[in-house]
Image (cartoon, rainbow, N blue to C red):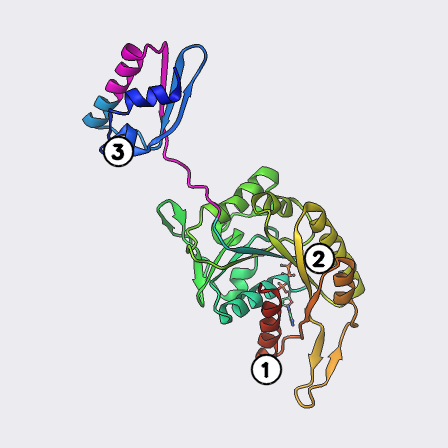
Amino acid sequence: MTKAEVIQVIGAINDPSTQKPLSESGTISELIVSDDNKIHITFGFERAQNQQFVAFQRELIRVLKNDLKFDGVKIDYKEPDEKVMPDGRFIAVASGKGGVGKSTTTIELAYAFARAGKKVAIIDADVYGSSVAQIMGITKNPPQAINRKILPFIKDGIQVMGCDLLLAGNDPVLWRGPMLGKMIQQFFTDVAWDRDIDVFLLDMPPGTGDVALDVQMMIPQCEMLIVTTPQKDAAYIANKAGLAALNLGHQIIGAVENMSYLTCAHCGERTYLFGQDGGQAVADQLQTELLAQVPMKTANNKEEIDATFDEIVKKISF
Ligand SMILES: Nc1ncnc2c1ncn2[C@@H]1O[C@H](COP(=O)(O)OP(=O)(O)OP(=O)(O)O)[C@@H](O)[C@H]1O
């Protein structure tokens, strides 16, 4: 007996979850007929404790056993998992070593995308040192849920979720492999992101590792931006991280050299504090563009920093 033949017969039975015949309800998630004349049906709704449900199940089993002559009948009920990746562009912000300003860059970039009229979300996937919420001044209240999905935190219109926000006090540093992967997956499929998000920015852990691999598997189209500082050692490690990212199949869209120079508030002259070659060297090695040299942040150069990031967004918007 084929699937179609089974559905034709059981199709007349009324589905208690939708009050429609099974032929119309679309609630049969899976139907397997095995060679030894057994049938396994999974319905996409939960088992209920009411008369209607009991009558439905009794009638179904009667038809399958008596009319269709199956020797074995197994029925499961399971709400379908809505493991759907959100739409939008994904940009992972990565660095070779910690402390080069990867989180700061992610956040500045988010604000620049927002200024350009884009709806932005940040995922702080830096399991070893989540700092996005801290830097953005988001209070780490326990996350709220809606429809069994976690609500993202929102600051200045930017939606945010991260390890520290999700776990509220539990330290993910000890997490390895599959558990880490599961958390990264949760960021995409279990958070109630607005449907019209244009850009997801991912603050990645420094270096290369499991998270980069997980991200690549879950979002093969994810682009990557490498942050470095001008110093030779930072550039060297950024290169290694970039090359590893390329090996994983990530598309690198550019390099950013952070903390490049200090601008004199009076004469506008730039002083390059740590040399000038790190960012360009990384871009050359990874055959990508040096998108910007970001100045040192001071108490009164917000405009200069904003303009630098607006320029980056222009370059990578296509
Ligand atoms: N352009 C800048 N000018 C001045 N200070 C900066 C700049 N960029 C980042 N910083 C400072 O450098 C420190 C490290 O920045 P940030 O946390 O963004 O780095 P990170 O690479 O994400 O670090 P980690 O890997 O530890 O998370 C912070 O104190 C931040 O304020």
Of the image marks 1 and 3, the number of the one nearer the N terminus: 3
- In the rendered image, residue 175 lying in the magenta stretch gets the answer no
Q: Disc 1 marks which amino acid?
A: Asn
Reading the image, the residue beneath label 3 is 17
Dot 1 falls on a residue whose secondary structure is loop
In this rendered view, identify the residue nearer to me: 32 or 83. 32
On residue 300, the disc is 1
Q: Locate the N terminus by quadrant.
A: top left
Characterize the local packing of mark 1: few (<14), some (14-19) or many (20 or more) Cα atoms within 10 angstroms: few
Q: Disc 3 marks which amino acid?
A: Ser
CB-based contact (under 8 Å), mark 1 and mark 2:
no
* Residue occupying image coordinates x 42% and y 21%: 32
Disc 2 within 8 angstroms of ligand 1 (CB) = yes
Q: Disc 2 marks which amino acid?
A: Lys
Q: Locate the C terminus by quadrant.
A: bottom right
Reading the image, the residue beneath label 2 is 97
In this rendered view, identify the residue nearer to me: 306 or 234. 306
